[in-house]
Structures are given as structure tokens and as C-alpha cells.
Image (cartoon, rainbow, N blue to C red):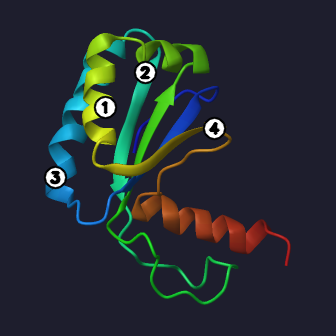
């Protein structure tokens, strides 16, 4: 997981691939795009990021929108998630000719893309086994019942 400052913003670019486009088709294009951002913007507001593919799995325990057992965009939705110092820094990263060339190559494989900006409210890592045990003990002793 990316360790980011508390005041970071997070951009999620939702990329819906055209029918028939495979992960192999898109992986290299995403890799070049992400490498470009990391190389040219690590010193201008880029904190880090990751890319995820919709596996089609749906958590019935975590969903309130019905009992769908497979997401309709299975293996067609790619999320490009990046963390930035500010929206202005992010927008500046998109203004280079090379970035636009790489992004165009990716969007040629896409049915649609849109990018949403979020303010990061919380982040955290899992406890190691020893700390998890201690946390449970404290909760059981002091938490409201």
C-alpha cells in the first residue's frame, strides 16, 4: 500500500475496456503511462498509486445494491488510482505531449474513461500478529459493550 501524507488527494480513473480487449492488450500501455508519471512527477506532487482490474467478484456482505453475484464489468474495468499533493499538481501532469500520447493509446482500447478526485480521509495497514493480539485485548477490556 502507498504511504501517503494525510492531506493528499486521490484520483480514480475508471477505464471501461471495449468488448474483446484483454488484460494483455492493456497492461503494457498502462505500465508505460504509470512509469511516465512516476518518472516525471515524483518531484512535482505525485505520491504514488496502483492499478486494479475488476475481477467480477461482488461482496454480498459489503453490498446494499442487491444480490448480484458477478459484476457486469468483470475483466473490463480497470482502475488507475493515484495519490497527489493537489489537484493542480495532478492536472499539470496531464499537460505534457508524451503523457497525452500514452493516454490516447490507452483510451483507444476503452469504451469510456472518467476520473474522479477524492480527498483522502483515512489510510492504514493491517497490524502484525503481535499487535493484532494486543489490540483485541485492549478492545475487549475497554470498549463499550
Relative vertical location of residue 119 with respect to residue 111 in this rendering, above or below = above
* Image vertical order of residue 101 relative to residue 132, above or below: above
Q: Which residue, given by chain and number where applicable, does mark 4 sit on?
A: 120
Of mark 4 and mark 1, the one earlier in the sequence is: 1
Ranked by sequence position, the earlier of labels 4 and 2 is: 2
What is the crowding at mark 4: few (fewer than 14 residues within 10 Å), some, or many (at least 20)?
Answer: some
Residue at image point 47% right, 76% down: 71
Tell me the tag on residue 25: 3
Question: Mark 3 Cα within 10 Å, few/some/many (few <14, many 20+)?
Answer: few
Work out whether 39 lies above or below 4.
above
Disc 3 and disc 1: Cα gap in Å?
14 Å
Q: Residue 129 versus residue 93: which sits nearer the camera? A: 93
Q: Earlier in the sequence, mark 2 or mark 1?
A: 2
Report the Cα–Cα distance between label 4 and label 2.
Answer: 14 Å
C-alpha distance separating marks 3 and 2: 26 Å
What crowding class fits label 1: few (fewer than 14 Cα within 10 Å), some (14-19), or many (20 or more)?
few
Tell me the mark number nearer the camera, choosing from 3 and 4.
3
**Local secondary structure at mark 2:** strand
Q: Residue at x 42, y 78 (%)?
A: 57
Q: Quadrant of residue 65?
A: bottom right
Tell me the SS state at disc 1.
helix
Question: Nearer the observer, disc 3 or disc 2?
Answer: 3
Question: Mark on residue 46?
Answer: 2
From the viewer's side, name the closer residue of 58 and 126. Answer: 58
Which dot, 2 or 1, sits closer to the camera? Answer: 1
Give the percent coordinates (x, y) of residue 77.
Answer: 39, 59
Which of the two discs, 3 and 2, labels the residue nearer the N terminus? 3
Residue assigned mark 1: 104
Q: CA distance from mark 3 to mark 4?
A: 31 Å
Q: Is residue 34 visible?
A: no
Left or right of residue 70: residue 17: left
Amino acid at each position: 500500500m502507498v504511504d501517503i501524507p494525510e492531506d493528499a488527494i486521490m484520483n480514480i480513473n475508471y477505464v471501461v475496456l471495449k468488448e474483446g480487449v484483454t488484460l494483455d492488450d492493456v497492461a503494457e500501455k498502462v505500465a508505460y503511462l504509470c512509469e511516465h508519471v512516476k518518472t516525471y512527477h515524483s518531484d512535482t506532487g505525485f505520491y504514488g498509486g496502483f492499478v486494479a482490474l475488476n475481477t467480477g467478484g461482488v461482496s454480498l456482505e459489503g453490498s446494499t445494491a442487491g444480490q448480484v453475484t458477478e459484476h457486469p464489468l468483470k475483466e473490463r474495468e480497470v482502475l488507475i488510482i493515484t495519490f497527489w499533493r493537489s489537484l493542480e499538481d495532478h492536472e499539470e501532469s496531464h499537460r505534457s505531449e508524451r503523457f497525452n500520447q500514452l493516454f490516447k493509446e490507452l483510451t483507444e482500447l476503452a469504451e469510456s474513461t472518467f476520473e474522479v478526485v477524492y480527498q483522502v480521509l483515512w489510510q492504514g495497514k493491517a497490524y502484525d500478529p503481535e499487535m493484532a493480539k494486543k489490540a483485541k485485548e485492549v478492545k475487549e477490556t475497554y470498549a463499550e459493550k
